[in-house]
Image (cartoon, helix red, strand yellow):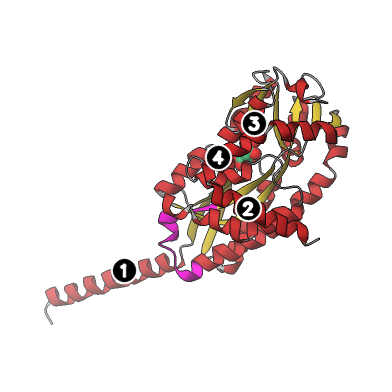
Amino acid sequence: MTIFRRTLIAVTATALFGASVAAVAQDIKPRLIRFGYGLNEQSNQGRAAKVFAEQVEKASAGKMKVRAIGAAALGPDTQMQQALIGGAQEMMVGSTATLVGITKEMALWDTPFLISSAKEADTLLDGPIGEKIKSKLQDKGLVGLVYWENGFRNLTNSKRPITKMEDLDGVKLRVMQNNVYLSSFQTLGANAVPMAFSELFSALETKTVDGQENPFNTILSSKFYEVQKYVTVTNHVYSPWIVLVSKKWWDQLSKTEQQILTDAAKTSRDFERKDTREEAAKAVGDLKAKGMLINELSATESARMRAKLTKVYALIGADIGMDLWNEAQAELVKIRAKK
Ligand code: KDG
C-alpha cells in the first residue's frame, strides 16, 4: 500500500473518530434553560424557581439544566416576555398583569375583589377558565405552563394609615404597568404611577412615590419595611404569577422534554403555593417586628371601594369579552356553592 493511501486512511480515521467524539459530546452536553424572574433569590418566587430547577435536572438525569436568574437581571417582566417571544430566552415567571398587552384576556386576573380565597384561586386558575386564558398565549409566541401565587395585594405608604377611601387622595401610588390597576387606583383617588417592579424600591426610598401595593411576601422579601411605614390590609386583588416558555424554543423540544418541564412546573406550583401561604400567614407579625404600623381596612370601607370600582369591572368585561367575564362569574358561583 502506497504511503499516500496509508496517510489518507489515517487522516480519514482520525476525522471520523473526532466526529464521533463530538457527536457523543453533543449528546451529553446538557440543554441549558435560562429561567428569569423579578424578585430576589430569597423571595417565595426565588425559592420556587430553585425547586423547579432541581426537579428538571432530576427528571432529565442532568440532560436539562435550569439557570434560575432573579432580581430582574434579565430585565423586567415585559422585557423578558419579548425575549421569550423572540427565542432569545427560554423561560420566565412573572405577573399576569404585565401580560395584558400581549393577551388581553389576562386582565381577568386584575379584577379587584374577584377572588376571595385560596380555594377559589386554585380552582379558577387551574380549571377551565385558567386553561382557556393560558391557551391564548400560544398564538402570541408563549406557552403558559402553570400559575404560581403572588398573593392577595395590600397597600403600603410612607404618609399615613389608609383607614378610609379618602385617605388615598393625593397619595402617589406606584402600580404595575397595567390599565386596570391604573384606572382602579385613579378611581379610588390616588395619584397612580405605573412603574416596573425593578425600579420600585429606589422610587420608594427617594419618595418619588409615596406607596405601592403588593402581597405581604413581596413587602417582606423586597424589604419595603425599610422605606415604608404603613401597611393597610385590603386584599384588594388576588394576583397570580405565570410560568412561561418561549414557544419558538418549546416547539424544538421532544415530547419527553416537554413533559419533564410540565411535570416540574406542576411540582413547583404546589410547593410555591404552600410556601407562599405559610410565609404570608406569619407576615403581619414579621412586618410589625420590622417596625411597620398595620391597620386592616374595615368591611364598610372595603364595600365602599368595591362600589366605587364597579365602572372598572365594565372596562375589564369590555377588554376580555363579556362571554369570558360571565363564564368566570358563573364558575365562581359554582366554586362557592361547593362549601
Ligand atoms: O417581576 C416581578 C413581578 O413578577 C411581580 O412581582 C409583579 O406584583 C408585581 C409587581 O408589583 O410588579
Picture quarter with the N terminus? bottom left
Which quadrant of the figure has residue 157?
top right
Mark 1 secondary-structure assignment: helix
Q: Which residue is mark 1?
A: 19
- Tag in front: 2 or 4: 2
The answer for how far apart the CA atoms under marks 4 and 3 are is 15 Å
Q: Which residue is mark 4?
A: 98
The answer for how far apart the CA atoms under marks 2 and 4 are is 20 Å
Picture quarter with the C terminus? bottom right
Mark 2 secondary-structure assignment: helix
Q: Is residue 139 above or below residue 177?
A: below
* Residue depicted at x 55% and y 62%: 261
Q: Which residue is mark 3?
A: 184
| Crowd band around label 4 with a 10 angstrom C-alpha radius: few (<14), some (14–19), many (20+) | many
Q: Which residue is mark 2?
A: 328
- Find out if the beta carbon at label 4 lies less than 8 Å from the nearest ligand 1 atom: yes
